Image (cartoon, rainbow, N blue to C red):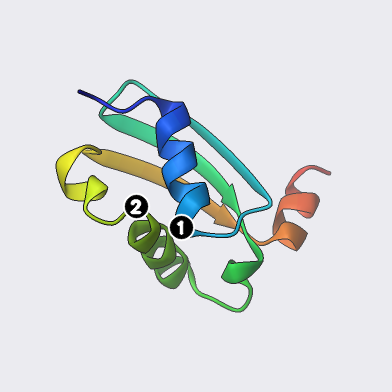
Amino acid sequence: MLPTPEQVRDYIAAGLPCEHIEVTGDGSHFEAVIVSKAFDGKRPIARHQLVYAALGDRMKAEIHALSMRTLTPGEYAKAGD
């Protein structure tokens, strides 16, 4: 059974402390905006690795593609301006 965007959001939230998460998708391809203090001082690849770690084996079995925008709370606040 394919996961819903809400399930993917919950998977990320369970493994990574986040201030904000938005997930959209069709069951196998998803797009996410993830805001976390854990991203402070990290390059994009390290941020993505944190998200992949939170998703674990689900990235191999359930989720076939995940496009993500990973932001610190400060970056997210500036993006809203």
In the image, is 17 to the left or to the right of 12? Answer: right
Residue 68 x, y percent position in the rendering: 45, 47
Three-letter amino acid code of the residue under disc 2: Leu
In the image, is 62 to the left or to the right of 49? Answer: left
Q: Is residue 46 visible?
A: yes
**Looking at the rendering, in which quadrant would you find the C terminus?**
top right
Check disc 1 and report its element: helix, strand or loop.
helix
The residue pinned by badge 2 equals 55
CA gap between label 2 and label 1 equals: 7 Å
Residue at x 24%, y 25% (from the top left corner):
2
Structural crowding at the residue carrying mark 2, measured as other residues with C-alpha within 10 Å and reported as few (<14), some (14–19) or many (≥20): many
Residue 44 x, y percent position in the rendering: 47, 66
**Looking at the rendering, in which quadrant would you find the N terminus?**
top left
Residue at x 49%, y 73% (from the top left corner):
43
Q: Earlier in the sequence, mark 2 or mark 1?
A: 1
Q: Which mark is residue 15?
A: 1
In the image, is 20 to the left or to the right of 56? Answer: right
Three-letter amino acid code of the residue under disc 1: Gly
Residue 8 lies, with reference to residue 14, above or below; the image says above
Q: Is 9 in front, or is 67?
A: 9
In the image, is 45 to the left or to the right of 57? Answer: right
Residues at badges 2 and 1 in contact (C-beta under 8 Å)?
A: yes
Quarter of the rendering containing residue 52: bottom left
